[in-house]
Image (tube, grey):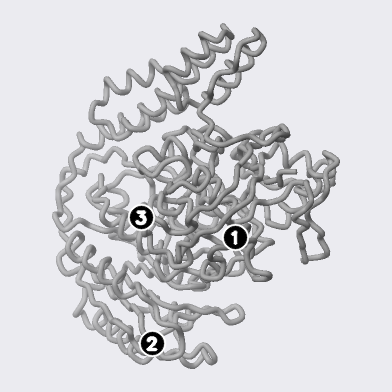
Amino acid sequence: MRKTTSFLSLLFCLPWLAFAPGRSAERMPFIRKDKDYALFFAVNQYKHLDNLNNPIQNARDIAREMEQSYGFQVEIVENPTIDQVDQKIAEYRRRFSDGTYASDGQLFIYFSGHGIKEGANGYFMASDSDPARPQRSAMEYDYYRNQVNQVNCRHILVAIDACHSATFDPSYGFRNDGRRFQRKGEEQFDRILANHESYKARCFWTSDGQGEQTPDRSNFAYHLLEGLRSRKYAAGYLRSSELFSVYLEQASPKPGGGRFGDDEPNSCFLFFPESSVKADPRRYEARQRDIDAYAALQATPTIAGCQQYLEDFPGGDFRTEVAALALRLQDEQEWQFASLKNTVESYQGYLERYPDGKYAREARSRVDGLRQAAGAQPSQGRAETSRPSAKPPDDMVFIQGGPFDMGDTFGDRESDEKPVHTVTVSDFYLAIHETTFDEFDAFCDATGREKPSDWGWGRGRRPAINVSWNDAVEYCNWRSRQERLQEVYAISGTNVTANWSANGYRLPTEAEWEFAARSRGKKEKWAGTSTESSLASYANYSEKVGKDGYEYTAPVGSLRANSAGLHDMSGNVYEWCWDWYDSGYYEKSKNSRDPRGPDSGSYRVVRGGSWDLYPAYVRCAIRHRRTPDGRNDRLGFRLARAVR
């Protein structure tokens, strides 16, 4: 997971992992009858805007979970007008003031629908809100934030699932650069309960943290519901910050959060399970031993250490991760042995044990080299394509072109992946891995550019991050000049045109990228596999944090390649493509050859997903967009070249 901003790290006082309880654990049954309330505003139908499909169903699903699993008294206001929003908030203010609702209780308020931004102000759009005059017809966050703050309820959490919801943040426009920092240290659970009883909380979550667009099919709502359904309340409750840091932060776009109004230091918003079970200190002690053992193994990974963990913790929470780590370490050990002997037999022995191992491709290449040196015929590898007459460039593979079905072939329901349509791509070369910091830093040194930050995660063979589309095309031209090739891009200010007959380096088109990710157009859901249970061996993505030993980006080539020989096409970092983004472009590119996207636009396509996303968002078919000057810790690129 990406670490929270310095601003957020001050605001959220909640630990992540389970912890050992204090002595007062035995006296803590959590009785919350008639103290927790949830109010939902969800809008599908609009008078002045396009209708939406999902907000009301999302609200119903979340409300049902909060009612059934956490004992909240819930109310959903569907398709409210702005007057109905006003009246309902005023009604809740009265109920908490006159004692109808417990003033020492909790109130969760959820808004889902359209949102807009005008100037520095953000607005949630009710069913009758007019985007032409939002000040008079929509819910202005600055005003309603104050209204909510004045509700006579000790703990309030506001969640907004709408475009530009980041503007609810009272510090919007004054944030730092968005870097994440480590979570704060752990507290004893009874201290958190004491703080909860003593201090006023005013917290908020927003479905975007930087003023970005939020999709109708909300990733924010998906991860919130996932967190509520996790049933992981080791201390007898689920913390709002745990929901945020473990679940919501996996959403795309990256959500925001913080505190507002009369919030007091050390306050918190908690979700108490309906069962109100009493805490068991022994449970925490066992959990802490499991965590400590796994942390020690991550610090010093050994095969023996993995075996010891699996023996000591037969029901441990990290058994899957440790088993995968043991396999990787064994792979490395076998390869070192094979390389040391450097014989056909040693490499064949490695391949017998690890036919899809990290070094399988290199092992086959060395077998061929040793046989050719001895005058024998090279072995028949498992390559599925013919090779061009010219030798492929270093660190690139030849992708033999052909027709394929592009788009959502697995029925994952993203509208911009439809319709599935047949396109044909020509032969091309594509880099085996994403462009690394080593490679991009050389470009910066040669051109006097400032090097992009790695956030302290490491440079070298990690993929370059914080690289814009504009940076990537300039790198392509520089790399072409270095190797005395024709430059592909003509750059004039912000205008970039491509000479597709040039033999230099360039970004892949969106069609080329998907064709290559699918191992030359196969019906593969992810790059290398269609089975989620095996995805962890091919892709660095959020559910796999810790499984490959890398919390953020992984060094290129750390995981298995797809059958085209390409690493990290799913996950690790988003990869810039040449094309302008158009959500309806697939309807226009049916039965085309070498489609290159619209002639103009506001966003460029990025593909493949990144290290902090769930499997659904690192699929081969999924499409994302970013402005050409956009930079963040999830954006990188890989090189393509024409076959000449």
Query: Going by the image, does 607 lie left or right of 229?
Result: right
Instruction: Name the image quarter holding residue 175.
Output: bottom right
- The quarter of the rendered structure image containing the C terminus is top right
* Of callouts 2 and 3, the N-terminal one: 2
* Of callouts 1 and 3, the N-terminal one: 3
Residue 128's disc number? none
Q: Residues within 10 Å of mark 2 (few under 14, many from 20)?
A: many
- State the CA–CA distance, disc 1 to disc 2: 32 Å
Q: Name the residue under label 3.
A: 243
Q: Name the residue under label 2.
A: 127
Q: Name the residue under label 1.
A: 605
Instruction: Name the image quarter holding residue 454.
Output: top right
From this view, report whether residue 505 is shown above or below residue 489.
Answer: above
Give the label, 1 or 3, closer to the camera: 1
The residue that appears at 31% across and 41% down in the rendered structure is 18
In the image, what residue type sits under mark 2?
Ser
Instruction: Name the image quarter holding residue 595.
Output: bottom right
Q: Are marks 2 and 3 in contact (CB under 8 Å)?
A: no
